[in-house]
Image (cartoon, rainbow, N blue to C red):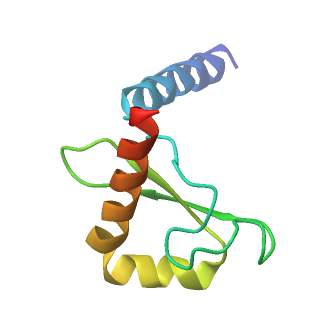
Amino acid sequence: MKPLLTALLLLGLSSAGLHAAEKPAAPYPLTTCVVSGEGLTEMGSPVDFVYKQEGKTDRLVKFCCKQCVGKFKKDPAKYLGKLDAAEAAAAKK
């Protein structure tokens, strides 16, 4: 029994280390869906998506519905540009 507990403890510690090494997602700067412009709760609960790009901080993107996630994935640069502009405007305030 003791070897099993030791193995579980080590597994938990190694998993915790992996999560700590991940980059945190940047906060979402809008109160609306980046694709549709609708309020995030107009279609029910908002859909959170973490966009990952190698060498960059992960980006949290929020959508009003699952369909907008698909539209985002077709042209992420277009929508990330909108998020960059929103972040820049917020930084000026």
Residue 73 shows in this picture: yes
**Closest to the observer, 41 or 22:** 41
**Closest to the observer, 45 or 32:** 32
**x and y percentages locating residue 85 in the rendered image:** 35, 54
Give above or below for 87 relative to 71. above
**Closest to the observer, 77 or 31:** 31
- What residue lies at 59% left-to-right and 19% top-to-bottom? 9
**x and y percentages locating residue 61 in the rendered image:** 50, 58
Residue 24 shows in this picture: no
Q: Hey, which quadrant is residue 33 in on the image?
A: bottom right
Instruction: Give the number of marks.
Output: 0
**x and y percentages locating residue 40 in the rendered image:** 69, 65
The N terminus, quarter of image? top right
In this rendering, would 44 be left or right of 59? Answer: right
Give above or below for 6 relative to 70. above
Extreme-front residue of the structure? 93
In this rendering, would 63 be left or right of 73? Answer: right
**Closest to the observer, 13 or 21:** 21
- What residue lies at 40% left-to-right and 34% top-to-bottom? 91
**x and y percentages locating residue 69 in the rendered image:** 51, 76
- What residue lies at 41% left-to-right and 50% top-to-bottom? 59
- What residue lies at 50% left-to-right and 41% top-to-bottom? 27
Give above or below for 63 relative to 26. below
